[in-house]
Image (cartoon, rainbow, N blue to C red):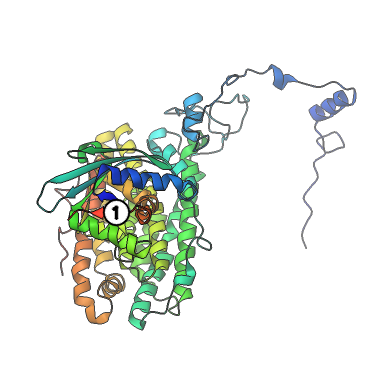
């Protein structure tokens, strides 16, 4: 079991995605630095920077604030992130209400943050790949932080 | 009765020219020309390398190797590939867009590769078997939106098709990208027409106002004006409709349709934004060009309320958001958020392109309902 959120959890996610290379090749390559920002429900913020390169995530770093280094960052509370990951794991994929686009569309419960609109548009241009990446959560045995 | 075209005999009594006859005689004697082996060979020895082998050999790779940077004003107006050896007497193709700033965007090469890597099939890649019967009001709402999208998407095929042949082939990457856009939009027409006809609802109403806006794009007097109207304003709005469609999807079929369309549309918007930026940054009369673009935007922005106060657009969306006609009030709350988002993203793109409209736009910051 890997604790969520943690650098190890995102690395495990990246490993599962790498095992699924054919799927990600079909969806198309990605070149993007994606930030994940998780507000631990008032107990500080956890930040991760995922470097998408080609058909895989080449590195995961834990950073104080991923926004300045990322093309775009998805941020939200630990509750929102946990809800999304749990939903994917329970259903084998996100249900209709837990896709990345759905969760970020209104700015809540998740929010898309980017330095400019062109960077934000990367999230839309490669959305299938980002969704497929998080769908790999179904293969990562997870222990959720309370 | 049709008349057979005259047969030219080139004064030789055959279909061959005197030069061709001379060459044929030489060939019969076993003598080859081989001039092509003595030609200058400006690319000889060039071996473009795959910088990222798992992706294959990209346009960026070959551009890094040779003749990758287009000239601002190419001397020729031909289809001869950039960097090739060209005959002295090649004909002028009659291109009207012969300067880089008129068509270029700094992201167009990458966007072409991205487009080819992310093509999909509306027949094969959509889980049509997941489509299930919906309550009548939801099915009608989905089909009204699908009808609108079937109607409007093809403009983004017709528009590039109108201009591509007028662009100098020296800027082949732009033409290639616009060809991918034409294919994307053909697929969007296909997928929304299929959605309308696949679940009992059928095609619904098309409106005069929508057609008027499409006509404005199609008949825009210059490429950059039409590109602003279509890529930045129109497709920017539709990108948010697609995002809303994914948000509101009632089954996996619709989720997949909208998510795939989001990707395509966002590429087009990205090109349009960066083309406008390049155009304004490199225009020989920059201040005048910016002023003209503001004039165009002032008129074009009237289309935003035309779109977002249209009952055939916002009410079906509100019904989907409210999960039925009975929840339409709740749905309208979401429409108000969409208004704010569309306006914000449009203004962000204008600012990025180098003509900031935030302080002068007439589009209200909040929905007027």
- Identify which residue, B265 or B35, lies in the foreground: B265
The quarter of the picture where the C terminus of chain A appears is bottom left
Q: Is residue B4 left or right of residue A73?
A: right
Q: Is residue A117 left or right of residue B231?
A: left
Which residue is the site of mark 1?
Answer: A142
Q: Is residue B166 left or right of residue A122?
A: right
Q: Quadrant of residue B286?
A: top left
Rendering coords of residue B117 (x, y %): 48, 46
- Identify which residue, A71 or B102, lies in the foreground: A71
Rendering coords of residue B70 (x, y %): 45, 29
Residue at 24% of width from left, 36% of height from top?
Answer: A69
Rendering coords of residue B25 (x, y %): 88, 26
Residue A65 in sight from this viewpoint: yes
- Identify which residue, A106 or B7, lies in the foreground: A106
Given the current orientation, which residue lies at the most extreme front position?
A1
Residue B341 in sight from this viewpoint: no
Residue at 62% of width from left, 19% of height from top?
Answer: B41
Q: Quadrant of residue B261?
A: bottom left
How packed is label 1: few (under 14 Cα within 10 Å), some, or many (20 or more)?
A: some
- Residue A59, relative to residue B71: is it above or below? below
Chain for numbered disc 1:
A
Q: Quadrant of residue A94?
A: bottom left
Given the current orientation, which residue lies at the most extreme left position?
A42
Rendering coords of residue A50 (x, y %): 30, 41
Given the current orientation, which residue lies at the most extreme right position?
B29
Numbered circles on residues, count: 1
Check disc 1 and report its element: helix, strand or loop: strand
Residue at 63% of width from left, 27% of height from top?
Answer: B89
- Identify which residue, B159 or A117, lies in the foreground: A117
């Amino acid at each position: 079991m890997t604790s969520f959120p943690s650098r190890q959890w995102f690395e495990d996610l990246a490993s599962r995605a790498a095992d699924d290379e054919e799927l990600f090749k079909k969806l198309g390559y990605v070149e993007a630095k994606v930030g994940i920002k998780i507000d631990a429900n008032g107990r500080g913020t956890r930040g991760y920077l995922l470097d998408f390169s080609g058909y895989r995530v080449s590195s995961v770093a834990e950073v104080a604030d991923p926004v300045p280094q990322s093309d775009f960052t998805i941020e939200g509370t630990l509750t929102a992130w946990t809800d999304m990951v749990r939903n994917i794991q329970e259903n084998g994929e996100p249900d209709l209400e837990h896709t990345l686009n759905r969760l970020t569309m209104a700015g809540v419960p998740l929010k898309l943050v980017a330095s400019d609109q062109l960077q934000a548009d990367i999230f839309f241009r490669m959305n299938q790949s980002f969704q497929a990446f998080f769908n790999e959560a179904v293969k990562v045995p997870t222990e959720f932080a309370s | 009765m049709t008349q057979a075209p005259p047969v030219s005999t080139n004064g030789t009594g055959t279909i061959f020219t005197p030069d061709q006859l001379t060459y044929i005689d030489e060939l019969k004697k076993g003598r080859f020309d081989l001039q092509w082996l003595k030609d200058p060979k400006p690319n000889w020895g060039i071996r473009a390398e795959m910088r990222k082998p798992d992706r294959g050999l990209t346009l960026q790779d070959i551009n890094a190797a040779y003749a990758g940077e287009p000239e601002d004003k190419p001397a020729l107006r031909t289809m001869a590939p950039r960097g090739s050896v060209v005959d002295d007497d090649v004909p002028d193709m009659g291109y009207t867009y012969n300067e880089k700033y008129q068509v270029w965007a700094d992201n167009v090469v990458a966007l072409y590769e991205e487009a080819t890597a992310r093509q999909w099939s509306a027949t094969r890649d959509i889980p049509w078997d997941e489509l299930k019967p919906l309550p009548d009001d939801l099915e009608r709402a989905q089909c009204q939106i699908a009808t609108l999208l079937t109607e409007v998407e093809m403009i983004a095929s017709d528009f590039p098709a109108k201009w591509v042949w007028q662009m100098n082939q020296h800027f082949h990457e732009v033409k290639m990208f616009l060809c991918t856009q034409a294919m994307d939009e053909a697929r969007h027409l296909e997928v929304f027409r299929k959605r309308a006809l696949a679940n009992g609802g059928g095609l619904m109403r098309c409106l005069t106002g929508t057609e008027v806006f499409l006509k404005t794009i199609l008949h825009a007097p210059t490429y950059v004006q039409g590109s602003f109207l279509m890529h930045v304003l129109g497709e920017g709005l539709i990108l948010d409709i697609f995002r809303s469609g994914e948000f509101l999807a009632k089954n996996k079929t619709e989720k997949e349709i909208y998510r795939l369309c989001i990707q395509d549309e966002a590429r087009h918007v990205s090109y349009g934004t960066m083309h406008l930026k390049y155009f304004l940054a490199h225009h020989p009369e920059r201040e005048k060009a910016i002023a003209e673009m503001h004039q165009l935007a002032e008129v074009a922005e009237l289309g935003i309320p035309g779109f977002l106060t249209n009952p055939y657009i916002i009410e079906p969306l509100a019904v989907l958001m409210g999960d039925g006609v009975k929840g339409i009030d709740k749905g309208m709350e979401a429409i108000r958020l969409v208004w704010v988002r569309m306006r914000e993203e449009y203004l962000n793109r204008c600012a990025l392109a180098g003509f900031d409209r935030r302080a002068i736009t007439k589009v209200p910051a909040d929905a007027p309902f």
